[in-house]
Amino acid sequence: MIQRLIIQGGTVVSTEAEIRADVIVEGERIAALTQAAQPTPEDTVIAAGGCYVLPGVIDAHTHIKLDTGIYRTADDWFTGTRAAAFGGVTTVIDFATQFPGQTFREAMDARRAEAESAAIDYALHVMVTDLPPGDEHKLGELVEMGAPSFKLYTTYRPNYYADDATILRILRASVEVGGLVMVHCENDDLVTAATQALVKRGDTGWRFHAQARPALAEQEAVARVLFLAEAANAPLYVVHCSTARSVELVRQARQRGQAAYCETCPQYLLLDERVYAGSNPEHFILQPPLRAEGEGAALWERVAGGAVDVISTDHCDYSLAQKRAKDDFTVTPGGLPGLETLLPLVYTYGCGAARGRLTMPALARMLSANPARIFGLYPQKGAILPGADADLVIYDPAAAGTVRASALHYIAQYNPYEGMPVRGAVRATISRGKVIFQAGEDDCTPGHGRYAPRRLNYNR
């Protein structure tokens, strides 16, 4: 007998509207939406009166148990995905790194073995670092393995760096195999010159970090990669845009007819470079760095106007000890923890009554439906529809709180949003029909999460 779960009395949020409805779940799938479900004694019922019922959040850019070849985060897949569950995230799209000398299958197999303890579902992009000319057809192997999105970098020489010829070659190949190229955009020459100038002056403390990676370096690389993608007639996804001009470049390309997408992250919407002059600049070492005061407001305008497709986290759970090992931005690992706070922060500062930047359907688009559609998980995930996976979040807008690292579930022992007020709270997280978090307690189990293979579909 299939177990039924009924979420009763909530406001169901779709990408177009908010409706009062009960959600009936049978096993792992959504069975129906109805105005008046009739529970039986055998059913499990969750009362959601006064709450939003959202599609489970899909964080399309995470780095759980990250190994860069230089640094390793201190977390593991169970720790990372359990923290995600507390924040209403039911799927992460992480990365399999192709280390030099590895085949794509070896990279995928190694990463999937690490992810066997995941508490929520996951998919994988692939960091392509070793694809000699003539081997571009091998990208088709990734498509067959359900990982049709390929990440490249215009910086981080020599570890990840791809020159323009390589980027163009892989963009062209992506069209042939049905893939999507994602690019971390920073002009490596500009970053190197700025960094070398700071090193020469002896200005390598954490507080100088933002000066080493100027906004122009990102913006130039975004413009260049968009130009190459247009020449290849290839779809392109620009990760973690930290400036409004970067987003504008993507928006303008889209207006010209390109299949161009972009994401930003809460850190760029809510924080700025003034933190580097504060008491804990080591908390904010990341690439790209935080930008000038006012840039966040300009980014919010683009988010509200629909120019940004996805809000993700670029989550990296480095420990405080790793961050504080040496007051030198050139050797401090870059990245911030963010999985558990994504939904509360976007709701608070986007949808909260005092903000009015986003509607609830817009939130559902950027945190769920758009990443599902762009990366090939829709409609299995990203929507509250009959037949879809029962990945759901119950969010109580009446709650109020403050971000405290001590209350979160990371390894990091710090949080970049420490002390920020938040409105609302996750009351329950449901992954494929299983209640994995409710009323402050979790029922996460290692291995509940499954690998979610993907096929791309650009009809957003």
Image (cartoon, rainbow, N blue to C red):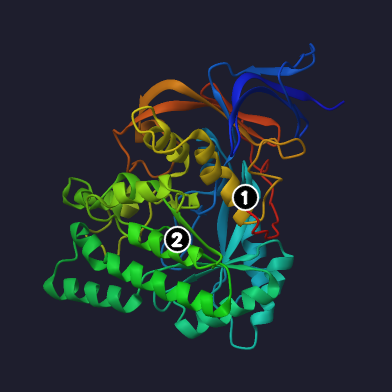
Three-letter amino acid code of the residue under disc 1: Ala
| Residue 160 in sight | no
- Residue at 46% x, 68% y is 69
Percent of width and height locating residue 374? 60, 56
Give me the residue at 71% from left, 21% from top: 6
Q: Which of marks 1 and 2 is nearer the N terminus?
A: 2
Q: Is residue 419 above or below residue 5?
A: below
Where 325 sits versus 82, above or below?
Answer: below
Q: Mark 2 points at which residue?
A: 251
Of badges 1 and 2, nearer the viewer stands 2
Residue extending farthest to the left is 201
**Res. 22 image quadrant:** top right
**Picture coordinates of residue 332 (x, y %)?**
30, 60
Residue under numbered circle 1? 372
Looking at the image, can residue 336 be seen?
Answer: yes
Badge 2: residue crowd in 10 Å (few <14, some 14–19, many ≥20): many
Give amino acid for label 2. Answer: Arg
- Asked whether disc 1 touches disc 2, contact meaning CB atoms under 8 Å apart, the reply is no
